[in-house]
Image: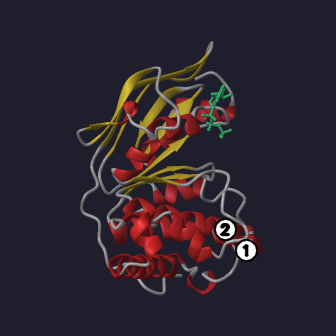
Amino acid sequence: MSEVAPAKVHTRALPLKVEGVTLAFGGVKALADVSFTVEPGTVHAVIGPNGAGKSSTFNVISGLYRATSGTVRYGDHELTTMKPNAIARLGVGRTFQNIALTATDPVLENLMVARYRLTRTGYVAAALGLPAARREERRHRERVVEIARFIGIGGLLDRPAGTLSYGQRKKVELARALATEPDLLLLDEPAAGLPTHEKVEMAELVRAISAGLGASVLIVEHDMPLVMSVAQHISVLDFGRLIADGSPDEIQNDPAVIAAYLGTEA
Ligand SMILES: Nc1ncnc2c1ncn2[C@@H]1O[C@H](COP(=O)(O)OP(=O)(O)OP(=O)(O)O)[C@@H](O)[C@H]1O
């Protein structure tokens, strides 16, 4: 899987505290008074049946949706009033359920786009080809290549993204999120639609990101074996409410969770 491990080890992951978050769309409460904490350096999963509020949770944390009430704090930063770019600059990166790569651009360029928030010299210097900008560009490319190798897509960098298989694109999407150097990575269904052997590979990657980089990972995923094998902590949503929060063992044996998944009353 990994040809080269990234040199940088993250040490800056902060606790993420979701406190009393409610998100209403008209009369529909996508989230109702949801609270949980992602401890630094852990893999934390958010699970629940379809429509439970998992994507809404991610969208509130990453600033795409504004919570109707409640707070999301990353360390001392209050995220609920911040724009998505500002949240990304704090080191909170994410992938999306629907992969959105530029099909005609090579994988390398798709990954470089994610580096722009880290660029110091600015567009004018880059456009003029000034030496400092060229040096910086080279450094970014080297780091992007390193990340691509870590994810196992080092051999695909020159390929137009549109020519890749679905599983390869899922990996590029993951590498693109990592290229923003997140300390907290939000993964939205990274294994959805993958065959079993690629799901296993994805689980290994999630563990490697957590163990190798020290980043916190918050993962939404329907595949229970994957969730149980990678997560140290699981929060369970049902109809927008947090119905359980604990270790994989506690969650697997929780009557309310079993009932939610079987579609019966707890
Ligand atoms: N932009 C929106 N406008 C109106 N309702 C929305 C919007 N986004 C989500 N919802 C509603 O909020 C609820 C939670 O949806 P959400 O997508 O967060 O669930 P989910 O757990 O991610 O589901 P899935 O597993 O199917 O992806 C649903 O009832 C959904 O219809």
Residue 188, placed above or below residue 245: below
Residue 255: image tag: none
Residue 169: image tag: 2
Q: Residues within 10 Å of mark 2 (few under 14, many from 20)?
A: some
Q: Residue at x 63, y 53 (%)?
A: 223
Residue 164: image tag: 1
Task: Specify the farthest residue to the front.
Answer: 128
- Determine the image quadrant of residue 86: top left
In-front residue for pair 32/252: 32
Q: Residue at x 69, y 29 (%)?
A: 263
Q: Residues within 10 Å of mark 1 (few under 14, many from 20)?
A: some
Res. 203 visible in picture = no
Q: Residue at x 62, y 75 (%)?
A: 107
In-front residue for pair 90/223: 90
Which comes before the other along the chain, label 1 or label 2?
Answer: 1
Kind of residue at disc 1: Leu
Residue 63, placed above or below residue 181: above
Secondary structure of residue under mark 2: helix
- Determine the image quadrant of residue 266: top right
Residue 117 vs residue 75: left or right?
Answer: right
Q: Residue 85: horizontal and vertical position, in percent?
A: 44, 47
Please say if the residues under marks 1 and 2 sit with CB atoms less than 8 Å apart.
yes
In-front residue for pair 182/113: 113
